[in-house]
Amino acid sequence: MRRKHIFGPVLSRRLGLSLGVDLIPFKTCSYDCAYCECGHTTEETITRQDFFPAFEVMAELREVLASRPRLDSITLAGSGEPTLARSLGPIIAWVKREYPEYTLSVLTNGSLLTDRNVREELLPADRVIPTLTTTNQQTFERIHNPHPSLRIDEIIRGMEQFRAIYKGALWLEVFIIPGLNTTDAELAGLKDAICRINPDNVQLNTLDRPPAECWVEAASNAELERVIQALGRTRGVGITGPRPPASAAAQVETGATDLIRATLNRRPSTVEDLVRTTGLAGGEVAKILGTLERAGEVCSKRMARGVFYMICQEPDDQERL
């Protein structure tokens, strides 16, 4: 079966060996984040829809999980906002009923936690990881370019309401952009919101791959440490660390070229990233990338951390970068 909705497993800095589940079309989201590694949003919406039949996703999961592979997480994520899918609740309930031995995680920007139905559908998940970067509406709009109807104070309230009923692990991601959400006022606002949301831990993240907007810069270790001090270590604030080493034996078998294509479809990666996330040898990765680059499928861009490879954009998309 050709997979449309399942990717990986890949090694995640936060989740370990993670099997990704994509419930929505590419870059359909309620935000158009300046730092997004997947590029600009092509369909910005807050309307929940039936993008794909739930049975399609379930069939792919059933095939991949038939051998009960070792996984640290089945993760609803992808290249947009998963809570926009009306199939979210049925798929979460099905996974927990059919495969209770696996940890089910949901990565979300948190914007739809204002919706009572979304909050209730997420309850069976073992781990929910929303994003919060600021409590200031102007900064929120600068970073996320959100759907015009979204307000950050309402989103924070939705996170508080979810925490009040959710018994699983709530991890809060805070994406740091130096000079934008690192002022004393910004950090004081974040600290207050974190106290009210009461997550189990807070994970700082910063730019690691080519962003949608070129003005976004990565925070230094010193800047991240200052943010930790401002937010308070007692809240479990920590920095998202480097990816763990991969084990090829733990990967679900798939063609090496298809695996690299699937990984690059989700995020730009260096050769070293691909070695870690796919378990393939460095020489094999480099050879496949060379073939794909000569064929015009893959492009490269040099950044501070090295040369990043990505699926080539269509001309109209490149003009937006």
Image (cartoon, rainbow, N blue to C red):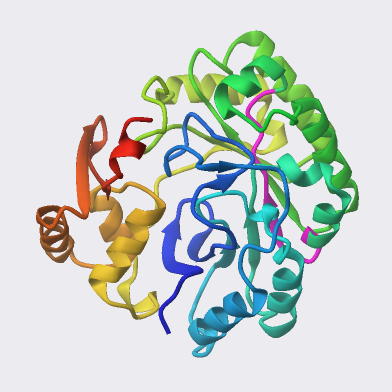
Left or right side of 85 for 207: left
Quarter of the image for residue 56 reads bottom right
Name of the residue lying farthest toward the bottom: 67
Q: Image point 28% across, 39% down: which residue?
A: 315
Q: Image point 51% across, 69% down: which residue?
A: 5
Question: Is the residue 58 above or below the residue 295 in the image?
Answer: below
Instruction: Work out which quarter of the rendered image holds the C terminus and state it.
Output: top left
Q: Indicate whether residue 126 is drawn in magenta.
A: yes
Q: Nearer the viewer, residue 120 or 46?
A: 46
Left or right side of 37 for 74: right
Residue 271 seen anywhere in this rendered image of the structure: yes
Name of the residue lying farthest toward the top: 184
Q: Image point 63% across, 28% down: which residue?
A: 133
Give the x, y percent position of residue 152: 75, 27
Q: Which residues are magenta?
A: 122-134
Q: Looking at the magenta stretch, what is its main secondary structure? A: loop
Residue 125 seen anywhere in this rendered image of the structure: no
Give the x, y percent position of residue 2: 41, 79
Instruction: Work out which quarter of the rendered image holds the N terminus and state it.
Output: bottom left
Left or right side of 311 for 29: right
Q: Nearer the viewer, residue 234 or 246?
A: 246
Question: Is the residue 120 above or below the residue 65 in the image?
Answer: above
Give the x, y percent position of residue 263: 36, 59
Q: Image point 65% across, 66% down: which residue?
A: 104
Question: Is the residue 249 above or below the residue 176 in the image?
Answer: below
Give the x, y percent position of residue 215: 39, 19
Q: Nearer the viewer, residue 229 or 133?
A: 133
